[in-house]
């Protein structure tokens, strides 16, 4: 058998940092393997999978926009988490070319929040911008951790449908994305022992896309801004959050977390997380 290899696929894909991450871990562990980016246009999934399914050296692929939902109809089986979320970000090739889909987005998203989630809070609220595949994982993960959710999208009815599907319990809200763009004079109550998140789970702010218009008067003081965009690492959303005095979490945190779970599925080894600081340094160059 030739050297095992995996891909990350998407459209666009040139900006992906996944090859650097997986290549870094492979080198540190001394594993003979390869991981590269492949540009797969919308509508090209079937041809891509047909090409690699029968290649015994191809061990699978990570899946990014816009394929996280459309790939489901092209593969053979789903992990329970991926089935619940209705989105796949990792496909693993099993024996005889059987392709199984997984979703490691929720696990990766929650990783930098774990110390906060271990504390007790009187109230937890998250404002989530976006209604795509990544947003699905984030909605489900935060609902499971006791958050009241406000989901904003260009189509509020889609946001409402996601909440009804993924977070049927609780008093959650769906609104139009434009609501957050204009200032508000809403008087927030005392937020002591409360945990507030504002999450950009959309492509807004990504290279080649318009910035996310979010006025920080819509978030209580001290809210944590979390942007899953990784290109650029310093988005206008994060910059405006810091100007408002809010702590921030950038897209590398989720990217590395979800990649770690996928790496173990692909190469059968836990990535060497003790080198995270070195890896982040490489990713920010």
Image (tube, grey):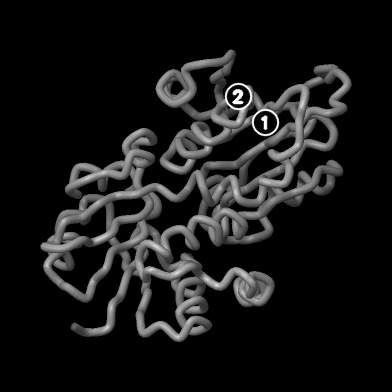
Mark earlier in primary sequence (1, 2): 2
Residue 14: give x, y in percent of width and height: 43, 68
The residue under the point 50% across, 76% down is 25
Compared to residue 155, the image places residue 27 above or below, namely below
Disc 1 element? loop
Circle 1/circle 2 CB separation < 8 Å: no
Residue 85: give x, y in percent of width and height: 39, 35
Disc 2 element? strand
The residue under the point 41% across, 41% down is 133
Per the rendering, the mark at residue 181 is 1
Per the rendering, the mark at residue 119 is none
Would residue 105 be visible to someone looking at this image? yes
Residue extending furthest toward the top: 171
Residue 15: give x, y in percent of width and height: 48, 66
- Tell me the residue that label 2 is attached to: 150
Residue 37: give x, y in percent of width and height: 37, 70
Of the 4 image quadrants, the one containing the C terminus is bottom right
The residue under the point 21% across, 55% down is 99
Of the 4 image quadrants, the one containing the N terminus is bottom left
Mark 1: few/some/many CA within 10 Å (<14, 14-19, 20+): some
Q: Give the quadrant of residue 4.
A: bottom left
Q: Is residue 234 left or right of residue 34?
A: right
Mark 2: few/some/many CA within 10 Å (<14, 14-19, 20+): many
Q: Is residue 124 left or right of residue 83?
A: right
How far apart marks 1 and 2 lie (CA) works out to 15 Å
The one of 5 and 10 positioned closer to us in this rendering: 5
């Amino acid at each position: 058998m030739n050297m095992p290899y995996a891909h990350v696929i998407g459209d666009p894909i040139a900006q992906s940092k996944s090859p650097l991450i997986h290549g870094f871990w492979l080198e540190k562990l001394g594993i003979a393997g390869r991981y590269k980016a492949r540009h797969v246009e919308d509508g090209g999934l079937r041809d891509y999978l047909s090409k690699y399914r029968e290649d015994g050296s191809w061990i699978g692929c990570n899946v990014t926009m816009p394929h996280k939902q459309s790939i489901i109809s092209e593969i053979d089986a789903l992990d329970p988490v991926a089935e619940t979320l209705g989105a796949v970000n990792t496909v693993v090739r099993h024996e005889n070319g059987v392709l199984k889909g997984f979703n490691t987005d929720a696990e990766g998203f929650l990783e930098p929040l774990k110390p906060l989630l271990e504390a007790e809070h009187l109230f937890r609220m998250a404002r989530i911008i976006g209604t795509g595949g990544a947003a699905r994982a984030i909605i489900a993960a935060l609902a499971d951790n006791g958050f009241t959710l406000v989901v904003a999208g260009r189509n509020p009815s889609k946001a409402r449908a996601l909440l009804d599907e993924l977070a049927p319990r609780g008093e959650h809200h769906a609104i139009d994305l434009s609501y957050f763009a204009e200032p508000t004079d809403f008087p927030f109550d005392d937020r002591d022992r409360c945990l507030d998140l504002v999450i950009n789970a959309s492509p807004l702010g990504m290279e080649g896309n318009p910035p996310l218009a979010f006025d920080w008067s819509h978030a209580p003081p001290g809210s944590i801004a979390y942007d899953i965009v990784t290109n650029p690492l310093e988005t206008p959303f994060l910059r405006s959050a810091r100007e408002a005095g809010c702590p921030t979490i950038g897209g590398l945190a989720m990217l590395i977390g979800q990649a770690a779970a996928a790496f173990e599925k692909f190469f059968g080894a836990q990535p060497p997380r003790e080198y995270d600081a070195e890896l982040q340094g490489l990713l920010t160059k």
